[in-house]
Each structure stands twice: as C-alpha cells, then as structure tokens.
Amino acid sequence: MADAKTVLQAVRGLLPRFESALSSFASSAATFQVLRSLPAPSIVEEAAGVARSSAPPRTLYVLDASFNPPTQAHAQMMAAALREDRGPRPRRLLLLLATQNADKATSPAPFAHRLALMTVFASDLLGVLSSTAGPTPVVDIGVTKFPFFHDKARAISESSFYNPDPPPEQVHLAGYDTLIRILNPKYYPPSHTLAPLSPFLDRHRLRVYYRPGDEWGGKEDQEEPLRDLAEGRREKDGGRREWASRIDLVGPMSSNEEGVSSTKIRNAIQKGDHEALTTLATKSVADWILQENLYTA
C-alpha cells in the first residue's frame, strides 16, 4: 500500500484529468458517467492506468453527496452497509457527485477538487475495508447531471457501465433529512406528487440513517414517514404502501455522529482547528484539504 505522500501526489496529478473529464461530460449528452474506479487500497496504480477486472455487481451501494468535503460519517455509512445489508454479492460501491443540486449551490470547493477529495476518501475507505472479512469491493467515482434520486437511479440503470442484463439493485445511502426531501411532493413538478418515485422504489432501495438531535425528534418520530407510507396516509400524494418495505431505517452510526458534517469540517478549517479536522475527516481527506489550502476563505 502506498504511503500517504505518494497517494496525494498521485491524486494531484489527476486534477487536470478531472477538469477535462468534467468539461467533456458537461458538453456531452450523457447524464451519468464513472470517471474513476479504485479496486485496491492503492490509487497509485490506478493513476498510472493499471486496469483490473471484476464481476458485474448484483448490488450497487450508492452514496450520493456533495462531498464538500467527505466525512468520517460517509465512511461509516458505507462500511456499515457492506457489513449489515442483505444485498446479494458481488457488491460494488459508487460515490456519486451531482453537478446540479436541488438545494445546494456549487461552492466553495470546485468540482475537480471534489473529485480529488472523493478519490483520496475512497483510498482511505478501501484501506479500512481491506482489513475486514470478505472481498474488498470496487469503489467507483461518478458524476451525474440529475439533482433528484429517481432520475439518478434511472441514469445509472440505463448506463452500460454496470452491464445491465439485468442492472444491479441500487441501495442509496442517505440521512433522515434526505428521506424527508425525497418524500416531499414539491420536488416533483408539474404534478407535485410522489408518482415519479415509482420506478425508483419499485426496484431499488433506500438505506436511511437516523439523525440524532432535537431538530429531528426521537427514533419513533423519525419512523413516522415510513408508518405513513405503510398505512396508506401518503396515497393522496401518490405514495404507495409497498414502498415502506423498500426503505430501511438504521443507525445512528456512532454516539458522536451529530458532530460529523461537511459544514463542521469547513468551519474547523476556517478557525484553524486542525485537531477537529482530523476527527471529522478521514486522514487522506484531512491531508488533502491542508495541502491544497481548501475552505480557508
């Protein structure tokens, strides 16, 4: 396994390629594209163009986030999914960055640096997963032009990248706050119903993590959206009872999960609190942020 300095140097060399890939993607008709795949804890071979083959996945775990920057909580979400979820093997992981977001502006880190952060994060994640039982999965780094989950899932399924015959079941990892947005009809014009979710939740799943803190209520409060689905109270909005069985509420991941967020990492950098950075981000992510002087403005 390459040392941290070598990894960061290799990723820095990828920045121009990321910028070029983003430009080509933006001008193309494609709506989803995998830009990098990391099949082993070392990204140095990958940066040098060494390819490795793997069996087509039956389960694809998708972490769709702004990665601005990636956090320890993101790593825990993915590790827990592989450890606990019922999805059949072979399994594969996808870190997905949307170049359009329904709620968030595209700042402060440029997209090329986000992809670099995702790459070093994937390297850290694979380092952790390689020490656990079972085969180490491939981690893909992809981009999409769609801001909404149901469109992203369709673009992934229609892509030829995952050998869709049939395409793998997608398990999208999200926090409880994201579930609330997914089940909000305002995001689905012009009818403003949940009907567009049918193709997504008919064949794919959501793995949703409880959020601690008074803002979100207790465990029973956070289970209410699923009860509403299961008992038919969302049928007036186009929601279907059977969707409740396609959504798993799990976690929380750790006792200090509430303190782990991209916003808190950015705030720690602006305050010069490098100790907090090292507890909130994985090691290579923290090193990249400091090396590239990100989030200081």
Image: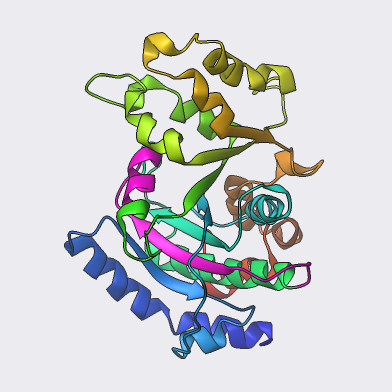
User: As drawn, is 266 to the left or to the right of 107?
Assistant: right
Question: Residue 289 appears at what percent x and percent y?
Answer: 57, 67
Say left or right for 137 vs 144: right
- Along the horizontal axis of the image, is 72 left or right of 145? right
Residue 84: x %, y % from top left: 73, 48
Q: What is the span of residues highlighted in magenta in the rendered image?
A: 131-155
Q: Position of residue 95 (x, y in %)?
A: 50, 59
Q: Quadrant of the N terminus?
A: bottom right
Q: Is residue 192 visible?
A: yes
Whether residue 147 is in magenta: the answer is yes
Q: How many marks?
A: 0
Say above or below: 294 vs 77.
Answer: below
Residue 147, image x, y percentages: 35, 43
Between 56 and 120, the one lying in front of the other is 56
- Identity of the residue drawn at 72% across and 73% down: 130
Q: How is the image coloured?
A: rainbow
Front residue (pair 104, 85): 85
86 or 234, which is in the foreground?
Answer: 86
Front in this rendered view, residue 287 or 47: 47
| Residue 100 seen from this side | no
Picture layout, residue 242 above or below residue 297:
above
Q: Is residue 177 above or below residue 267?
A: above
Residue at horizontal 44 percent and vertical 59 percent from the top: 109
In reply to whether residue 47 is colored magenta, the answer given is no
Residue drawn at (63%, 34%), measured in percent from left and top? 248
Q: In the image, what residue occupies the spot 52% across and 31% down? A: 179
Is residue 237 depicted above or below 219 in this figure? Answer: above
Instruction: Point out the residue furthest to the right here.
Output: 255
